[in-house]
Amino acid sequence: MKSGLTFLVAAKRCEIAELRQLALTSALVNVTGRLVHGLQRERGLSNLYLGSQGTQFADMLAQQVRTCQQTEAELRACFDSLDTDTVRQGQGARLFSRIAYVLQGLDALGGLRERIAALAWSTGQATDAYVRLIAGLLAVVFEAADSASDPEISRLLVALFNFMQGKEFAGQERALGSALFASGRADAAGQQRLLHLIDSQERCLQVFSEFGHPPVAELWAASQAGATLAELERLRRVLCTAAHGSPLNAQLSQTWFDCCSRRMDRMKGVEDRLALDLLRACEDKIAAATRELESFHALAPRPGRDADALSFFNATGAPDTPAQGYGHQLERSILELVQEQARRLQTMGEELDTVRASLNERKVIERAKGLLMAHRQLSEEAAHKTMRQMAMNQNRRLIEVAEAVLAMADVLPHSPP
């Protein structure tokens, strides 16, 4: 007959297996982040190349494409290493669906590059294409964060995802600003988009600050000081305050790109630190769980020595005296270990619920934005601005407004065609 210890050991083995899966997922997130960073730079260079009508930046773009191709090969190898034959619990279906979508995008990347090289696409078309692929890659990171079963690792993944998302908005700002400067003309729609991207960065970085470890938040704060940020703010003012249609200095396109790139390289340093903390947390938790599993084997009862069965009914959940004969280094009964494990899992569950609330809020807000975009024919920026205005007018949180929008889905008016 199987004992309580048998199932306690099985529970610990399941925990170790989950942590090892998280470690593999964390490694996948690391490579994904490097490819996102490379594609962000490729996107910016593509806009400079297209904005100059192919007269500049061709060599830099070609070099960046080669770098991205190398990282892409690493990511595909990570995908190949995932176990797709064993049925996974939790978010496995959604994670694999995201990966399938990303692979379609990676397969189409060659065609995108050919169109850019031939000057067959505008900067807007190229940017939208890169944004779609990068969004798919970030969705893989999101699903990894949503599937984490350990609260500390989940917090780190939430911090990493939001930082990567903020960095993506910074990358879109770099690409858009590059195109605006390279075109030599101010554009009102582009200026509004730029302001939206700046605001979106701040929102993501705020969530990162809430969930990241203090040393990483301090590293980010320190990286923001200095001449680079001052130069970026100056160039932002040039772009955002120019009258629609007024001339812009096209020579500033390179200055803008370099300034934004310095900032994004610093962001990549912070992202790398987040990824390292994530991997170390997985390794430390696997090592601790393995040590605890080994200690369980010392609890096998000796012949003729049984635990006090009535200790189960002890009001405090522990016997009055330590159980004997369960291993000289652990003077605790199996019951005490089971109760401790139950308390720990309860605490972990509560912490995990708190962390996932942030991810769930994001899902609700995105669904509400999509609903407004579909019903009122709004852009993504306009839908988000509408919801934020509603929140301010009603003195409510954005998530509360989003929930109200979704609750009224059936009665929202459609804009005339």
Image (spheres, grey):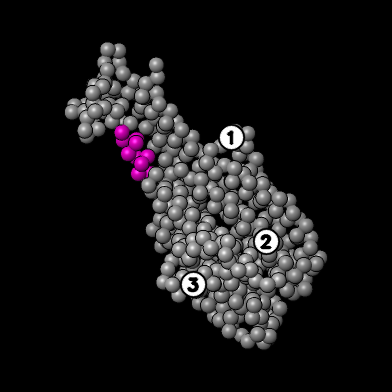
The amino acid beneath tag 1 is: Val
The reply to whether dot 2 and dot 3 touch (C-beta < 8 Å) is: no
Using the image, determine if residue 16 lies above or below residue 348: above
Question: At 25% across and 32% down in the image, what residue appears?
Answer: 317
Q: Which mark is residue 87?
A: 1
Where in the figure is residue 383, as x and y percent of width and height?
57, 69
User: Could you classify mark 1 by the number of other residues whose Cα lies within 10 Å: few (under 14), some (14-19), or many (20 or more)?
Assistant: few
Q: Split into 4 quadrants, where in the image is the N terminus? A: top left
The residue to which callout 2 is attached is 130
Question: At 66% across and 59% down in the image, what residue appears?
Answer: 132
Q: Is residue 347 magenta?
A: yes
Question: At 62% across and 44% down in the image, what residue appears?
Answer: 96
Whole-number angstrom distance, CA of label 2 to CA of label 3: 31 Å
The reply to whether dot 1 and dot 2 touch (C-beta < 8 Å) is: no
Residue found at the very far left of the displayed protein: 320
Please state the total of marks drawn on the protein image. Answer: 3
Circle 3 SS class: helix
**Lateral position of residue 155 relative to residue 239, left or right:** left
* Magenta-drawn segment: 339-348
The amino acid beneath tag 2 is: Tyr
Circle 2 SS class: helix
**Lateral position of residue 204 relative to residue 94, left or right:** left
The residue to which callout 3 is attached is 390
Where in the figure is residue 260, as x and y percent of width and height?
58, 70
Asked whether 314 or 194 is in front, the reply is 314
